[in-house]
Amino acid sequence: MIPQSFIQDLLNRVDIVDVIERHVPLKKAGTNYSACCPFHSEKTPSFTVSPAKQFYHCFGCGAHGSAVGFMMEYGGLNFIEAVNDLADRVGMQVPQQQPESRPGMAASGGQSTGNSSQDLFEVMNTATRFYREQLKHSESAIAYLKKRGLTGETAARFAIGYAPAGWQNLAAVFPDYQARMPTDPLVEAGLVIENDDGKRYDRFRDRIMFPILNQKGMIVGFGGRVLEQGEPKYLNSPETPLFEKGRELYNLFGARKAIREAGRVVVVEGYMDVVALSQHGIDYAVAALGTATTPYHVQKLLRQTDDVVFCFDGDNAGRKAAWRALENSLAQLVDGKSLSFLFLPEGEDPDSYVRKSGKEAFEGLLSQALPLSVFLFKELSAHTDLQTSEGRAKLVQEAKPLLAQVTAPTLALMLLKRLAELSGTSQGELENLLQIRRVSSSPSPRPRAPRPQPASPYRWLLQVLLHDPGYASKLERELLRGRSEYAEEMAAVVALVEFIDTCPHMAEGTAIPSVITYFHDSPHRALLEKAESETLAWDGSIDLEAEFSGALARLREIQRKQRMTELHSKSLSALTPEEKQEYQRLMAS
């Protein structure tokens, strides 16, 4: 696990403006920087980056975080990868240690492996070079690629190789192939299989090899395709410390520039589809890796573009795959972004179609893709008779769990209206029947100056502590006990104070660079992010001491009234002499 002190040192050394500006053009706006948000579609900039506080916040969609958070959300990296990436930029070595107990906190690192990621990446690079060299000497593999219409230039661009037939070919480039090690890098990287008898053999044999790159351009796995007939047709690397199928997309690293230029991305089913489309000038295609499209895939794609087109074969299997993609996309939908579905003519896949008909014809089909809303109700309606009351009732019931997942306010409203039309009911009746709440689509307002006093004294206190953790040492802890109508906010303050107490380097009065880094998986994350974003309006003229004193005064008043209520609820004869004196004192204060 990565020590919290290291993360703090890293964030103090990294400039969030430099990190974000590598990916998003920023403009100076007073003491901060602004841009159109990279996480949702907008025309007026609502994305703010604070160099003083070292966090970003979007007042439109609520995206919020530190430099680490930005690399995770925008770059699609996990926590460990994001920390390592930033550490590399500033020349810091990431230490590893077991996590300490953090009250109210989730651990911020990941399990360590027997071999470092760097060792495993080198193993993958060595294997890639070996497979590419083997392709040069395999007449059958070269003949297969030529038959599929691939040029040598395309094969080289995608670093395509060939794993020869035979059981232990990798032994030629890995001298320790037969060595017995507690944690074998070849096994850990998924290149070699060791059976129950201790015998070892190559996972990939007699297959065309497609290296899979992560979002940093590093090889994390392989897809291997049989030359002719055989099962499975495609064999992918297993889950490894480097590779999770549900999080990676083939060619996303290589396609990023083309996706931005085209303003869309096409998601296809196979490696050869991606390669063939690229050879015909369609470089904005990616593929899922032998698994259904996952919510994480959709998140990654929507960060790259506003227009995602899923392209499937026109057969029954293709429609089933498309429906799974739709189901996994609903919760990720954002107003202003488009997901659509293209079904190719019977018997065609993107590879065969583009080779036969060319780029212009394929892109013409893309313009005919069905929007998600159309495909959704087309599929639901195909399985029921809308001429009957029973059929319309069935449609509503089948649509209910799907619409409940949609959080994009405007799209959710449009889908509800369309369901009302198809079912012959009013929108209000549907809202009551499905218990769907209307969601406001208006963006969160920007903070105003002068700053309004927060409704809750705990929120007020959160803002002060996030701006200057040094005030935790001055806090009267007894004010954080007992019952409160603001129980959630009080719990967040307690968690933040406990965290500051366990991190001495934060008691020096420096602002915490974005709580998302420390409370990433905490139930208090959203509340803390909101409180932190509200401090963007603060400047050097703010009187922190007065803010802190004001928050404490309100907390004392709340506790005074609570205690008076408790004493007043007792009969006079039941009060002890001490309680009577306390009541008189509270009444007078």
Image (cartoon, rainbow, N blue to C red):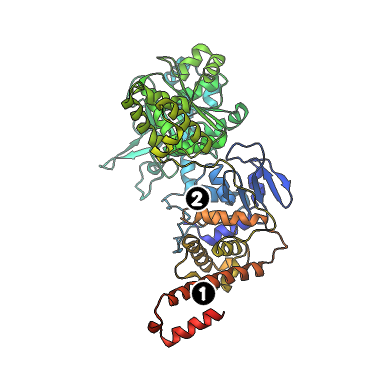
Residue 71 position within the rendered picture, expressed as x and y whole percent measured from the top left: 56, 46
Q: Which of marks 2 and 1 is in front?
A: 1
Q: Which of 302 and 215 is in front in this view?
A: 302
Up-down relation of residue 377 to residue 118 (above or below): above
For disc 1, the marked residue is 560
Up-down relation of residue 151 to residue 522 (above or below): above
Give the position of the C terminus as an image quadrant: bottom right
Q: Can residue 541 be seen in this view?
A: yes
Up-down relation of residue 147 to residue 257 (above or below): above
Q: Is residue 207 visible?
A: no
Residue 264 position within the rendered picture, expressed as x and y whole percent measured from the top left: 56, 28
Nearer the N terminus, badge 2 or badge 1?
2
Residue 189 position within the rendered picture, expressed as x and y whole percent measured from the top left: 41, 41
Q: In this view, does 424 lie to the left or right of 8?
A: left
Image disc number at residue 80: 2
Q: Nearer the viewer, residue 573 or 83?
A: 573
Q: Which residue lies furthest to the bottom in this view?
A: 577
- Residue drawn at point x = 50 percent, y = 50 percent: 80
The amino acid on which the numbered mark 1 sits, given as a three-letter code, is Arg
Q: In this view, does 570 lie to the left or right of 2?
A: left
Q: Is mark 2 on a helix, strand or loop?
A: helix
Q: Residue furthest top?
A: 356
The amino acid on which the numbered mark 2 sits, given as a three-letter code, is Ile
